[in-house]
Each structure stands twice: as structure tokens, then as C-alpha cells.
Amino acid sequence: MYTSTSLFVAALVGFAQAQTPSGFKPQVDTKLDVIFNSTMVNTAGQQISKAAVASQPQIALASGMVSASETYMFVMLDLDVPPANGNTTRRVLLHAMKTGLKATKQKLSGKATLLVSAEKGPAPYLPPSPPATDTVAHRYVQLLFQQPASLSVKASDFDGSQARVNFDIASFMSKNGVSEPVAANFFRVDGRAKAGGSGSATGTGGVPKNTAQPFTGAASAMDVPYGLTGLLAGLALLAV
């Protein structure tokens, strides 16, 4: 009886620590702090409104895990893009890939270190936009990796919408020598009109005017590049 109870408690602890959706690989148990202006992803899997995630997030990692000498890479995926061409399998969309992230001296609540980058890509942030006609809330996964010194990924690799659709994170990791994620988080966005969302106020600043900006830790106004405008138009057909 003791053994059964212990296993049950251990299973609950493991479930509570999971920062990625059930069945998603790679599985990650370490939390990545993800903050969208005044909304923080407090609990992995919580539902957030589409308006709250319209601009790219700030990210932070537990200070004890951060190395000043390391460079990090951020990836965000939508796991629930509707099927196409008569297929019944939902697809994965790459919503963002940011390289060159470094630790700062800025702390969040004294526990997590803010990570920033002056780079805009190689895959600029695309805000979640699940269709109002979809029957499920989309799961958006955020992953933080140590960036290999040999990584060679260009903005041109993600110019078209098809380069982001059916993105295979395991294949990308294997091809580019990327190790398992350092930390992760995920949230849900429901495109249906009456669906709401939750989050906690963090007082991190105003809303940026667009999403094509560096991870600087502060809102800054920049023009959306022509290429990104075209990409957004193409992805509008996917409603992701």
C-alpha cells in the first residue's frame, strides 16, 4: 500500500512539474518565465486571451540556472494548426525563433534573470491567431535552448509560410546539434468569440506597436519588414 501511494504521489509531482504538454517531445520540467507585457504565464497550460499575446514576450530563467557565458535560443510553436487537404492530423507552426539571447542583470521578483537579444530573428514573432471556427484551444509551446556556437540559421530559411508549417523541432535539433531544452512553458489560446483568458499583471510596460523587434526587455517601436508583412498575409489563410 505504501509503495502504491508513493508511486501515485511521485506521478502527481511529475505531472505538476511538466512544463510541456502531455505527449510533446522533448519533455521539459524546468519552468521558463514568459511575460507578455502585463500578463505572465504563471501555470503551464493556462488559457490566455489572443489580445494579451499580440506582441512578443519577454523571457526569464531562474537565476541559479543562468550562465553569463552562455548564449540562448528561444523557440515558440503552435501544436494545433488545423489539418489541410483532407488530412485529419493537426500541424505544427513555428511562431518564433530568436537567437543571441544573453543574461542581463535585471531580475524578476528577485528570482529570475531576464534574457535579451539585439537580434530580430531568424524567425520573427508571429502572434497567435487561432480561427474562431476551430473546436479546440491551440497549445503554444515556448522552449529555451543553449545555442550552439556552430548554429547557422538565417532569416531566409523562414521567409515563406511553408517554411514554418509542419516544423519538426526534433529534426531541427538533430540537424543543428542543439541539446535538450533548458526550460519551457506553454499556454492555450481559444479563437472562439466567447473564449477568454487569464494571466497575472506584472507591470512590465506598454504594448509594443508590432512584433518584429529585438528581445531587448523593453517595448520599442519598429516598422514591420515587408517580408514579414507578406508572411503574415500568407499565414492568415491558415488562421493560426
Image (cartoon, helix red, strand yellow):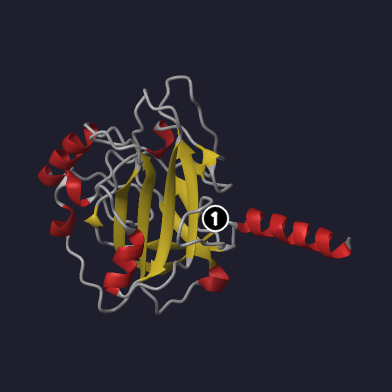
Q: Is residue 163 left or right of residue 217?
A: left
Q: Residue at x 15, y 39 (%)?
A: 229
Q: Residue at x 55, y 59 (%)?
A: 31
Dot 1 amino acid type: Gln
Which residue lies most toward the right here? 1
Q: Is residue 163 visible?
A: yes
Residue 122, given in percent of the width and then of the height, sits at 22, 59
Tell me the crowding category of disc 1: few under 14, some 14 to 19, or many 20 or more residues within 10 angstroms, Cα based. Answer: many
Quadrant into which the N terminus falls: bottom right
Q: Is residue 18 left or right of residue 77?
A: right
Q: 5 left or right of 88?
A: right
Q: Is residue 52 above or below residue 60?
A: above
Looking at the rendered image, the quarter that the C terminus falls into is: top left
Marks counted in the figure total 1
The image quadrant that residue 158 belongs to is: bottom left
In the image, residue 205 sits, relative to residue 132, either above or below, namely below
Q: What residue does disc 1 label?
A: 19
Dot 1 falls on a residue whose secondary structure is loop
Is residue 16 toward the left or the right of residue 158 in the image? Answer: right
Residue at position x 77%, y 58% in the image: 9
Nearer to us in this view, 169 or 149? 169
Which residue is more in the foreground, 200 or 131? Answer: 131
Residue 113 visible (yes or no): no
- Residue 134, relative to residue 102: is it above or below? above
Could you say where residue 30 lies in the image, as x and y percent from the top left?
55, 63
Judging depth in this view, the residue of 51 and 131 nearest the camera is 131
Q: Position of residue 123 (x, y in %)?
A: 24, 54
Residue 64 falls in which quadrant of the image? bottom right
Q: Residue furthest top?
A: 194
Q: Where's residue 49, x and y in %? A: 46, 32
